[in-house]
Image (cartoon, grey):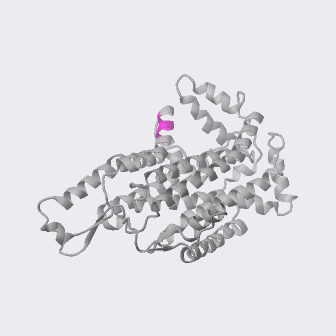
Amino acid sequence: MRFVKYPIINLVNDHLINYPTPINIHYAWNFGFLSAICLIIQILTGIFLAMHYTPHVDLAFASVEHIMRDVNYGWLLRYAHANGASMFFIIVYIHIFRGLYFGSYVKPKQWVWVIGVLILLLMIITAFIGYVLPWGQMSLWGATVITNLVSAVPLIGDSIVTWLWGGFSVDNATLNRFFSLHYLLPFVIAAVSLLHITLLHQDGSGNPLGIESKVDKISMFPYFIVKDFLGLTLFLIFFAFFIYFFPNILGHSDNYIEANPMVTPAHIVPEWYFLPFYAILRSIPHKLGGVIAMLASILILATLPWIHSTEIRSSRFRPFYKIFYGILLSACFLLGWIGGMPVEDPYILIGQILSIFYFFYFLIIIPVLGQLERFLLYNKNLSSWPNTGIIITGSRIWTYKTLKH
């Protein structure tokens, strides 16, 4: 039924109720919905926190303590916002690795994937400047270290750093700028996320088999909405567990010490969700090279629609790819561990090896493996293939027996 006079109702109906959804998608497809919920939580809690926060170097730390101690349910708002950032990154990282496993970057969804990488980049910027706002020791020195990296840019680097700081050091002007940007960027992320969803629904959602099909689809409501809300219930239990029992475990203890520009922390580290990229940065013994490698480690994801060389989307039918995918997943976890370790041997060497593999995976394995699979599939000697089974390429299904003839 169409509601011609009510375009908003039509929009909800087309994208949340009657939207044709592949019948075989499972709970790995819940994480897009959960990431939207995380974004809503961050925006709402951020708005209420901003009502009580004071972006001034002499008052910021005290205003955060005021929120925690004096504002009704201020502790809940603060812990929900701080831990919500970690939950947001957990959900988005799972969402990305699901996309890598099931080939969500393959045409015609290449721009959906590229917009998703842009959302990740905006999230990283927003989370970084948000980490500065409590004005603890790690806030001040983390901002000093990371913003100083821009000085590696030839000719204009120092001018950019001065512009970012609003002066000659991380000070009151910096805090004001970061607060303004931190308030603005979540709304930018929300707008880009709407574009992400619109592009996704234009061509339809993927599925675990990687087949483009106009059949075997059912409406999203009530089947998958119920499934999403079951996932949401489990996620909220997991989220609440951290808020009520371990609210500070994902943060750094030094950030509960007021910022002091005269005292440098023994070990400056970013939040846990930045650690893999921070490990890649530290692995390059050259400042500009490290910055380029760190940015490339994020932006290289956006090139996947054009550097991959296979029509087979789902890894269920790519046994060799599954092995390398497992190694990549392990390497990312290890890079996160290395990022939190001191800058000394053997951590430097391990980080360099893992960083090399990370780029080797995207620049060599992804392009070459698809060509190798195609060669094994279409070469003249197909007698070694079993007589049963299927290979799925894009929208086509081939039997081994058919290919042999």
* Left or right, 81 with reference to 275: right
The picture places residue 379, in percent across and down from the top left corner, at 15, 58
Residue found at x 48% / y 37%: 292
- In the picture, the quarter occupied by the C terminus is bottom left
Residue found at x 63% / y 64%: 4
Residue found at x 45% / y 49%: 301
Provide the major secondary structure of the magenta segment: helix
- In the picture, the quarter occupied by the N terminus is bottom right
* Left or right, 121 with reference to 211: right
The picture places residue 130, in percent across and down from the top left corner, at 69, 47
Residue found at x 62% / y 36%: 147
The picture places residue 373, in percent across and down from the top left corner, at 25, 58
Front-most of 364 and 280?
364
Front-most of 366 and 280?
366
The quarter of the displayed image where residue 181 is located? top right
Q: Is residue 138 visible?
A: no
* Left or right, 212 with reference to 149: left
* Left or right, 45 with reference to 3: right
Front-most of 398 and 28?
398
Query: Which residue is situated farthest in the top direction here?
Result: 155
- Total label count? 0
| Magenta residues, start to end | 289-293
User: Does residue 277 lie above or below 146 as drawn?
Assistant: below
Q: Is residue 209 visible?
A: yes
Query: Which residue is situated farthest in the front direction here?
Result: 4
The picture places residue 347, in percent across and down from the top left corner, at 48, 48
Whether residue 233 appears in magenta in the rendering, the answer is: no
